[in-house]
Image (spheres, grey):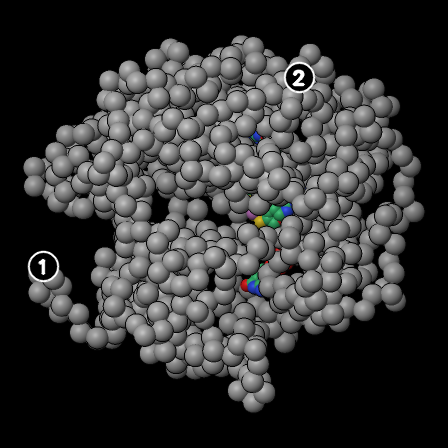
Amino acid sequence: MTNTWQDIKNANIVVVMGGNAAEAHPCGFKWVIEAKIENGAKLVVVDPRFTRTASVADYYAPIRPGTDIAFLNGVIRYLLEKDAIQHEYVRAYTNAGLIVKDGFSFQDGLFSGFNEEKQSYDKSSWDYELDDQGFAKSDDTWQDPRCVINLLKQHVSRYTPEMVSRICGTPQDKFLHVCELMASTAAPDKAMTSLFALGWTQHSVGSQNIRTMAMVQLLLGNIGVAGGGMNALRGHSNIQGLTDVGLLSNLMPGYMTLPQDKDTSLDVYMSTKLYKPLRPGQTSYWQNYRKFFVSFQKAMFGDAAKQENDWAYDWLPKLDIPLYDIIKAFDMMNNGQMTGYICQGFNPLQAFPDRGRSRRGLSKLKFLVTMDPLDTETSRFWQDFGPQNPAKSAEIQTEVFQLPCTCFAEENGSLVNSARWLQWHWKAADGPGEAKSDIWIMSGIFHRLRDMYRKEGGAFPDPLLNVTWNYTNPIDPDPEELAKEMNGRALTDLTDATTSAVTKAGTLLDGFAQLRDDGTTASGCWIFTGCFTEKGNQMARRDATDPREQGIAPNWAWAWPANRRILYNRASADPDGKPWNPSKPVISWNGARWVGVDVPDYGPTVKPSDGVGPFIMNAEGLGRLFARDQMVDGPFPEHYEPLESPVENVLHPKVRSNPVARVLASDRPTFGDVKSFPYVATTYRLTEHFHFWTKHALINAILQPEEFVEIGEALAKEKGIEQGGWVKVKSKRGEVVCKAYVTKRIKPLTVDGKPTHVIGVPLHWGFTGQARKGYGANSLTPPVGDANTQTPEFKAFLVDVEKTSAPVTA
Ligand SMILES: Nc1nc2c(c(=O)[nH]1)N[C@H]1C(S)=C(S)[C@@H](COP(=O)(O)OP(=O)(O)OC[C@H]3O[C@@H](n4cnc5c(=O)[nH]c(N)nc54)[C@H](O)[C@@H]3O)O[C@H]1N2
Ligand SMILES: Nc1nc2c(c(=O)[nH]1)N[C@H]1C(S)=C(S)[C@@H](COP(=O)(O)OP(=O)(O)OC[C@H]3O[C@@H](n4cnc5c(=O)[nH]c(N)nc54)[C@H](O)[C@@H]3O)O[C@H]1N2
Ligand SMILES: [Mo]
C-alpha cells in the first residue's frame, strides 16, 4: 500500500476493482465502511461477479475477466477528453510534459523494439529526448506532439465507451457512471483510493493492470494524499515482508536485484543501478544503491567482505537464465533439471497452475523436503486424488522428508502488513509434538551443509564457509538478534560529515541515511533500518495516539521506509508546500522545514522552490504516465486478451495476447480454444477458508464443507444444471467434478456482440484435512505468467461444463 488501512477512511471514492476486500480482507474492510459512514464516501466495485464487497457498494459494474486495461484506458480517455484532471498536480508532479524520443512508436499492438524471435522488447526507444547535459527535454506548455501527455492522448483515443463495452462486456452507461464518480476526485481536496489484489495481479498483463490505475490516480492528483493511493491488499500475513527481504528468485533484500550472469563484476552490476538524475537538481535516491549493497554484504559476510574482493560480490548467486519463477521451476523438474526441492511453508500441488504438471514434476524428483505445521497435499502428493490422476504411488521414486514446524503463534517475530508496518508478536504457546521452528530447522541444515563442505570440499564452498553466523545461540538464533542484524549497525566509529556527531562502533543505526559504501556499516535490509535501534524494538511499540484522528498513529509499530505512513507524501502539498486539502493535511512547508502528521518523503529542509520532484526513486523525480524503463511490455498499458480467451483482440487481431507474457514453448500445446472450451473461468477465495490450511480445522470444514463452482442461472438453464447438482468442469489440462451453485450473482456479458458466460471456481479444496475431498481449482488453470512478475494467470482461462452424476470417489 502507498497509504495505510486506517487512511482509507479519508477517501471520498473507494474503488474496489481487482479484488474482493469484504471477503478476503474482512478486518481491514471496516475502514471502507468507516469512509462511507464518517466521510460520505461512495464505494464502487468493478468485478465479474456481484461479490460480498459489491453487496455493500454504492455502485457495481460487471466486467469480463482480463479486460481491466481496456476499461481503465477508457477512463483515462474520458478524463483527458472532459479535462477532468488535477492540472497543477499533473504539471508539477508527473512526466506529462517530458518529450519522448523520436524512435518510440506503437502500431498494430506492438511497441517499437519488438524482437519476434526472442519474444521480447529492446526498450532503448522507450525514453526521453535528452539535452547535451543528459537531462530530459520538456515542454511545459504541452504543445509538442511528442510530449508524454499528447502521446498518451493518442494512445488511449481508441478506447471509446463503445470499444470499452465491446471488449469488457460492461454496459456503456455503467462504464460512464464509474468514469464520472472517479472524475469527481480531480478536485484538489477530493481523493479516491484504489484497493486491489489478485483480480489484477493474476493475469498475463497483471502489472500493467495496476499501472493503468496508477496513471488514473496521477491524473486525478490522488497519489501521496490522505485517502488516496494505490493500495495493494496483500495476502498472507507476512507476504509484504517476504518481498521486502527479497525472497523472490530475482531479488535481494530491500528491492535490490540479484546480479545476472552478464554482471561480471561489481562495477558492471553497479553501472546499471545508480540512476543519474534526469532533471537538474533531482534527488534520484537509487544513487545510494552502493551503500545499501555494501552494507548488505557486510551483514552477510562480515570481515570476509572487503574492498579487495569487491565486498564478496562473487559469492552472490548470479541468474543464468532470465528467471527461476515457479513456472520454470516445475518445468525443470519435469525435464529432470531439478532433482531436489525444499518446500518451506508452501503447498504448490494445490497452489500452482496446472496441478497435473505439478504432480508429474514432483514425481520426478529424487527428494522433496517439506517444512510445514500441517500434512499438506504437496507432502502427500503420491496419494494424489482425482479422475485424471490415478494414484500410482508404487511407481513414484521421490523420497519425501516431512519436517513438522511451528507457526507464528508459537514463536516471537515480526510480520509486515500491507501498510508496510513491521509489527512484533510474541509467542503464545509451545508447538505440539516434534514441531521445531523454521529458524531451528534452517540453522540445522546450514550447520550440516557447512560441515560437509569443510570436510569434503566442494565446487564452490566460499559463500557457505564465509557467511557470518555469530549469534549468541548459533543452533537456534534469537529472532530479536536477527531483527537487529536486519536493522544494521556501525562497524567502526562513524562521524557525521555535517554535524560531526560520532556514532560508536557497534551502535544500532537509526536510519538508512547512515549507511555507507566503505565497509563501515552493516545492514541486512536497508529499508528496515530504524526498526530496532538503541531506543529498543520499534516494531513492539503499541501507542495508538493519532494526532489529527486522520489514521496516522506514528508510534504504533514501525513502517518502512523511515516510519513513513504515506509514500510520496510531498505530493500531498502544492508546489509551494501548501496542502491541496487543508482539512486533511499530511505534510506542509512552514517556511523553514516540512512539518505534519507524517514523516516527510523528502529532505526535511529541501525548499519547495528547489523544485525537486516528489517521486525521488525515479531519476526524473516525477510520477510516470510514460514508463521509460522497468516495464518489459510497454511504456503505455495496452489491452491484450488473456492467453486463453473467448474472442479475438478487436483492437489488433494479429497481436491477440501479451506478446511478452511468461509462456514456455513446451506449454503452448496445453492451451485450449473457444470451440472446445467456450466459457470463461476465474478462481478466487472465500472468507470461511484460508487457502488449503483451514480445511484441517473442523469448524471451517463445517462452514464450507465441499468443493463447488458458481454458475449463472442462464447458463445453468441452458445446460440443464440444477442447484446443488453434480457438474464436471473441464479445461485442456484437467477437470474438476463437484457441486454446482446456481446464482443470480454472475450474469452473462455481451462481448463483441456475443453472450459470454463466466464460471466461478473457489480454490480451497484438496485431499488432506477435515473437509470433503476435492480436486482443487488448479486442476484447470494454465501455466501462463505475467510478463513482468510471472504471477500466474489464475483469473482468466477457458473451460467447458456439463452436468454429471456423483463420482464414486466423492
Ligand atoms: N478468507 C480468506 N482471506 C484471504 C485469503 C484466503 O485464502 N481466505 N487469501 C489471502 C491472499 S494470499 C491473498 S493474495 C488475498 C487475495 O485477495 P483478493 O484478490 O481480493 O481475492 P480473490 O478472491 O482471489 O479475487 C478477487 C476478485 O477478483 C475478481 N476478478 C477476477 N478476475 C478479474 C478481472 O479480470 N478483473 C477484475 N476487476 N476482477 C476480477 C474475482 O471475481 C474476485 O471477486 O486474499 C487474502 N485473504
Ligand atoms: N487458481 C488459483 N491458484 C492460486 C491463487 C488463486 O487465486 N487462484 N492464489 C495464489 C496465491 S495469492 C497464493 S498466496 C497461493 C497460496 O499458496 P500456498 O502458500 O502454497 O498456500 P497455503 O495453504 O497458504 O500454504 C502455506 C503453508 O504454510 C504453512 N505454514 C503456516 N505457518 C507456517 C510457518 O510458520 N512455517 C512454515 N514453514 N509453514 C507454515 C501452512 O500450514 C500451509 O500449508 O496460492 C496461489 N494459487
Ligand atoms: Mo496470495
Locate residue 195, reporting x and y percent.
46, 34
Q: Do labels 2 and 1 touch, CB within 8 Å? A: no
Locate residue 51, reporting x and y percent.
60, 29
Q: Nearer the viewer, residue 704 or 595?
A: 595
- Quadrant of the image occupied by residue 284: top left
Amino acid at pointer 1: Thr
Which of the two discs, 2 and 1, labels the residue nearer the N terminus? 1
Locate residue 182, reporting x and y percent.
41, 20
Q: Is residue 476 visible?
A: no
Q: Which mark is residue 751?
A: 2
- Quadrant of the image occupied by residue 574: top left
Q: Which mark is residue 267?
A: none
Residue drawn 39% across the image and 30% down it = 626
Mark 2 is surrounded, within 10 Å at the Cα level, by few (under 14), some (14 to 19) or many (20 or more) other residues, namely many
Amino acid at pointer 2: Val
Relative horizontal placement of residue 732, taking residue 523 as reference (left or right): right
Relative horizontal placement of residue 132, taking residue 45 as reference (left or right): left
Q: How far apart are the alpha carbons under marks 2 and 1?
A: 64 Å
- Quadrant of the image occupied by residue 635: top left
SS for tag 2? strand
Q: Nearer the viewer, residue 115 or 748?
A: 115
Most distant residue in the bottom direction: 455
SS for tag 1? loop
Locate residue 37, reporting x and y percent.
39, 27
* Ligand 2 lies under 8 Å from the Cβ of mark 1: no
The quadrant in which the N terminus is found is top left
Relative horizontal placement of residue 22, taking residue 330 as reference (left or right): left
Residue drawn 68% across the image and 22% down it = 648
Residue drawn 84% across the image and 27% down it = 721
Q: Name the residue that disc number 1 marks.
A: 498
